Image: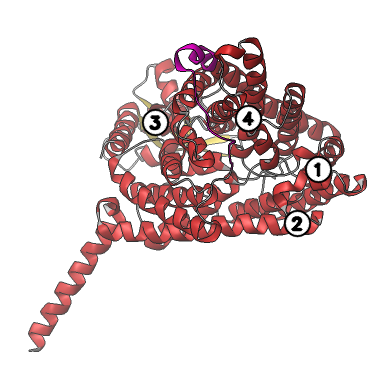
Amino acid sequence: MLRHLHRQLDETRRRCAEGWGLVRHKGPSQIQFWFIALLLGVASGLAAIAFRGAVEWLQATVYGTDNVNTLHSFAEALPWIWVLLIPVFGGIAVGIILHVFTTDGRVRSVADVIEGAALNDGRVEKKAGLASVLCSWITLSTGGSTGREGPVVHIAALASSWVANLLRVDGITGRDLLGCAVAGAVSASFNAPIAGALFALEVVLRHFALHAFAPIVVASAAGTVINRLVYGDVTEFTLPGTTTVEFYLELPAFFLLGLVCGLVAVIMMRSIFFADDLETNLQRRLGLPYWLRPALAGCLLGGLAILFPHIIGVGYETTSRALTGHMGLGEAVAFAVIKVAAVSITVAGRMGGGMFSPSLMVGALTGLAFGHIATGVFPEMSSAFTLYALAGMGGVAAAVLGAPISTTLIVFELTGDWQTGLAVMVSVSMSTALASRAVNRSYFLTQLERRNVRLSAGPQSYLLAMFRVQGVMRKPTDKGAADEEICLEMIAQGLFVQASATLETALPRFDKSGVAFLPVVTMEGEEPVLQGALFQVDALKAYNRALAATAAEEHR
């Protein structure tokens, strides 16, 4: 009897161990993982709704209005001193938080989530990430001219990182968990289940592997259910009447609009990077502490908001006005220019927030302005100029995010208008084709390139940076180690590589020197101390194994 009981217990332990191994290593193909994806989608959806509610509550509190959807109209009636000071107070709070909880004074964003997916097994920083969410909440609530999707994506990444660490899963499963969390959060934030799933695949994971698709769709659906339980089955924007396209005569206009949107997107992105470099240089020259940078940006924003209160917050009121045509040509152009300036100030000031909502607003204004001109020149062969606003909204947003598929779908889901698909698709395709050649594919990937994190060229580029020389080298006691005397001679000639370097640094040295191995050293003061040797064949083997593993993950 006891022997039988022991056998049963051993069998139970064995099955539990096998099940745990499946969840850790082959989770996406298992029903158990789908259940985890469902829970993660629900949790991320609730977090996204909570963040949205928190922004609305604090925004209503500091500006004194009950309806944040008409915030800029309400701000027009506020005393100018409050319009000026509220962003300043918000910037001071953001600066203090970044000073205490980060080492570089930088708010984490979608770019960091993409980096975590590619280089850190689907994990992101916890402490700096939580501080960044708090900073984005304050920024969006006190006049910052950005969007809420960036912090929502980061909240989701924090949740998935916690689950991945709790389950101790490998990189493939960690990335799939990250995709599930992001899909749930985006879907809950915008009531866009299709776009939420594709955003996670296209932007964050940057592949469409079948093993990730099913759990991500489950999580996205869960996030959408959360949104509809809270807000009902409504779209963010309502278009007037019906929109139709004079297909054969009008399509060339949408091709041209796409090129214009691509150009506007490039101007917008480069304006942000220019403002960031300018503020960084001024900060260094003046010796200002980095915690003061958001406050100075808040002062500039407040001054701008006195004249143009539409820049405050997410800007959905102005976007709605553009989509419904309640704006003239001159007003649309001026508002687009001012919005780009406001976004540049906010982001360069390290205040936090996302880029999707600002790009929607700038795109809608660009499309509306183009529509006014097109319908004015060719009135007999043009549809409603508000259709151009819709196509422009998708064109600029897709070019900024580098996500033509998910952006096209999210525009449809935000407006509920599926009849104008061809116009939006034409605009999106042309804008992304143009903008992706002027920057490193997208705003997020260009951000990473500016930090020397090279993901835009694909795995063949960034995988080399994942391997430290110390982990690939042969120690003096290993079989086949390099001759110590030869290594010392090479060190004397300056031919060596540091143990902390990556293969990205080491491999070009093999090409230049033509040697079979490089001594690996650590520096003690100015003296190099021999630790071993890096053989070119070992480096290439490690690189090839990583490439094979990446290809297997993306095609599994």
**Label 3 sits on what residue type?**
Pro
Name the secondary structure under disc 2.
helix
Along the line of sight, which residue is nearer the eye, 136 or 168?
Answer: 136
What is the count of numbered marks?
4
- Disc nearest the viewer among 1 and 4: 4
Task: Determine whether label 4 and label 2 are within 8 Å by CB.
Answer: no
Question: Can residue 556 be seen here?
Answer: yes
Query: How far, Cα to Cα, is label 1 from label 3?
Result: 39 Å
Marks 1/2: CA–CA distance: 18 Å
Q: Residues within 10 Å of mark 1 (few under 14, many from 20)?
A: many
Callout 4 amino acid: Ala
- What residue sits right under mark 3 in the picture? 459
The tag on residue 364 is 4
Q: CA distance from mark 1 to mark 4?
A: 25 Å
Task: Sort mark 3 into few (<14), some (14-19) or many (20+) by Cα contacts within 10 Å.
Answer: some
* Residue beneath the point at 23% across and 63% down: 19
Question: Rounded to the nearest whole Å, what is the CA distance between mark 4 and mark 2?
Answer: 25 Å
Amino acid carrying label 2: it is: Ala
At mark 1, the secondary structure is helix
N-terminal label among 1 and 4 = 1
Left or right: residue 92 compared with residue 474: right
Q: Earlier in the sequence, mark 2 or mark 3?
A: 2
User: Nearest the camera: 16 or 477?
Assistant: 16
Residue 497 coordinates in the image, percent (x, y) = 47, 30
Determine whether the residue tagged by mark 4 lies in a helix, strand or loop: helix
Residue 411: in magenta span: no
Q: Which residues are magenta?
A: 237-255
Q: Is residue 448 left or right of residue 90?
A: left
Which disc is residue 60 wearing?
Answer: 2
Which badge, 3 or 4, is on the more N-terminal residue?
4
- Give the labeled residue for mark 1: 298
